[in-house]
Amino acid sequence: MDEQGEPTTQDRGTPRGEPAVVKRVLVVGGAGYIGSTLVRGLLGDGYRVRVLDSLEFGDTSIRALYHNPDFEVVRGDFRCVEPVVRATQGVDAVIHLGGIVGDPACALDEDLTLETNLAATSLLAEVCRGAGISRLLFASSCSVYGTAEEIVDEEAALNPVSLYAATKVDSEKVLLAARNQSLHPVIFRLATVFGWSYRPRFDLVVNLLTARAGSEGKITIYNGEQWRPFIHVEDVCRAFRMALVAPLELVSGQVYNTGSSFMNFTLRQLADMIQHLEPELEVEYVDNADIRNYRVSFERIRREMGFQCHISMETGIRGLQEALRRGLVKDYREPVYSNYQTLLAQVRQPNEQPAPEAEWMAPQFSKNSLWWNLNQANGRVEANGHAKPAAKPAKTASHAAAGRG
């Protein structure tokens, strides 16, 4: 305690007593791209699994699990208190995958994005504290680094250049502030996810390029020299599963870049790999205003959790090609396979046509958005609409004592 009787950072971060073994897991967004793969892995590990999902994209991705006595679904919107309270009852851990995902999708309705990605995360944290939940694992994104000249690790300054990334930064802060002796949030900054899933998505760069290469025989690469880190969806799920059994004193309040260093590629290198597997492919290179560019260090998660990606880019691309050739997707262009297209259909004005590359871009912040209004006063945004780089995070007392960071 400090002189005012408030808990110090170290008080808040020290697990109290011997934590119970996790047996029951809630996956928020469990019918989605990552979630539908994750819940199968959790069931295979012997957990009882509950999903909270609005099922906006239907339940095809999880319907085969309904007969499993260890699986249940709470259909509901995690922005609302009642379904969140109901879903968290009796579980030991929560994996939070819910929200509007992707830079372009988040830019379509900024106030809805803030309500879904930030306010709902705050609600979930408070409910988890009240429900006595121990582990709260959160899917953040490496997009919080925005643009960086050097390889960035978890202690690097954050530089979100899109609303999606900014809501991830703010959600991380909300969750880490909720940490106490009972609730232990763990943040996973995911590399750009790719690969086949039970709920396929083709608004992800690798998946979209692979589908276009096989269907049209031509792809367009925007800003080919820009760097991105990548991770297969099955490796993402493995990282979450490892965190459920990792010692609390190791992972509580920790932030992990999630991926592997050998999976950092330029977009040109990505195109070369796809072209190697589709030899007749034509590749066009175009520059645009998208400034995202970052290479990421994944040393912390490798050192502390022993995590490394198992699935290479080539293997993941081949898996997508096989699924498409087997006809598992009739038309990858259908809106159901795109978060951006689905939300666009809800908010687009009649006769409004987005630019062809809109699904790839990281749009600047709108100056009439709620996020802009909230953060302009305290200097967190610049005149051009981009977020200012966040200060380099300070080490907490518990991390400094452990020699981490």
Image (cartoon, grey):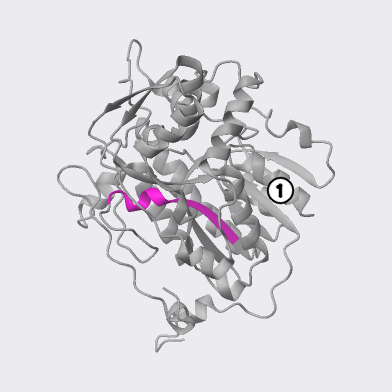
In the image as oriented, which residue stretches furthest toward the top?
A: 351
Residue 248 colored in magenta in the image: no
Vertical placement of residue 39 versus 304, above or below:
above
| Left or right of 218 on screen, residue 97 | right
Question: Which residue occupies 45% across, 77% down?
Answer: 399
Q: Nearer the viewer, residue 235 or 13?
A: 235
The stretch of residues the image draws in magenta is 136-147
- Which quarter of the picture shows residue 117? top left
Looking at this view, is 239 or 370 the one in front?
239
Magenta-drawn stretch contains 142: yes
Picture quadrant of residue 359: top left
> In the drawing, does residue 293 fall left or right of residue 189?
left
Residue corresponding to mark 1: 41
Residue 250 visible: yes
Left or right of 60 on screen, residue 394: left
Could you say where residue 104 lies in the image, as x and y percent from the top left? 37, 33
Residue drawn at the location 34% of the way across and 73% of the way down: 394
- Other-residue count near label 1 (Cα within 10 Å), few / some / many at <14 / 14–19 / ≥20: some
Q: Name which quarter of the figure residue 340 lies in.
A: top left
Residue nearest the viewer, comparing 126 with 108: 108
Count the numbered circles shown.
1
> Looking at the rendering, in which quadrant would you find the C terminus?
bottom left
State the residue at coordinates (58%, 57%). 127
Task: Name the spot of residue 106 as percent of width and height, x first.
Answer: 39, 36
Residue 221 screen position, x and y as percent? 34, 29
Q: Would you place residue 247 above or below residue 275 in this image?
A: below
Q: Position of residue 10 (x, y in %)?
A: 48, 81
Q: Tell me which amino acid carries mark 1.
A: Gly
Q: Is residue 203 visible?
A: no
Residue at coordinates 33% horizontally, 50% vertically from top-left?
Answer: 294
Q: Secondary structure at mark 1?
A: helix
